Amino acid sequence: MRVVVDLLRKNGWAEGHKLPTIGLDSAAGTIVVKLASFLQPKGVGSYLRTHVGRVPRYDTSKIQRELGMRFRPLEQSILDTMDDLERWKHIPGPA
């Protein structure tokens, strides 16, 4: 998440938005987030408890090899998602 927050800050999404300022990517941070997850809506809390503290790993070699698909860079996908959320008025745009 720290990388995503840094990406959003570098691209103007910090102004007018609540982005985390304290890094919680440590054992203590994981405990804090898991405890705070019980105060979140059911789906969000469940997701946090099962995913926080784990590094996602994906292997797309088979789909690339067998279907010839190529994926866009993750950074571009995140920024495109933010632009789309703004376009559909789910969030305000960057200042």
Image (cartoon, rainbow, N blue to C red):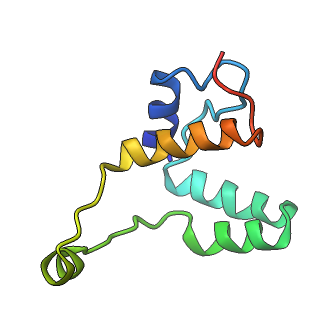
- Res. 83 image quadrant: top right
- Res. 70 image quadrant: bottom left
* Point 63% across, 22% down: residue: 94
Left or right: residue 35 compared with residue 49:
right
* Point 67% across, 37% down: residue: 87
* Point 61% across, 30% down: residue: 21
Q: How many numbered discs? A: 0
Q: Where is residue 88 in the image (x, y as percent from the top left)?
A: 72, 42
**Up-down relation of residue 14 to residue 95 (above or below):** below
Q: Position of residue 33 (x, y in %)?
A: 68, 56
* Point 49% across, 49% down: residue: 25
**Up-down relation of residue 9 to residue 20 (above or below):** above
State the quadrant of the C terminus: top right
Front position in the image: 90 or 45: 90
Q: Position of residue 24 (x, y in %)?
A: 56, 46
Which residue is outermost to the left? Answer: 65
Front position in the image: 48 or 95: 95
Left or right: residue 31 compared with residue 60:
right
- Res. 7 image quadrant: top left
Left or right: residue 10 compared with residue 45:
left
**Up-down relation of residue 71 to residue 18 (above or below):** below
Left or right: residue 79 compared with residue 37:
left
Q: Where is residue 31 in the image (x, y as percent from the top left)?
A: 64, 60
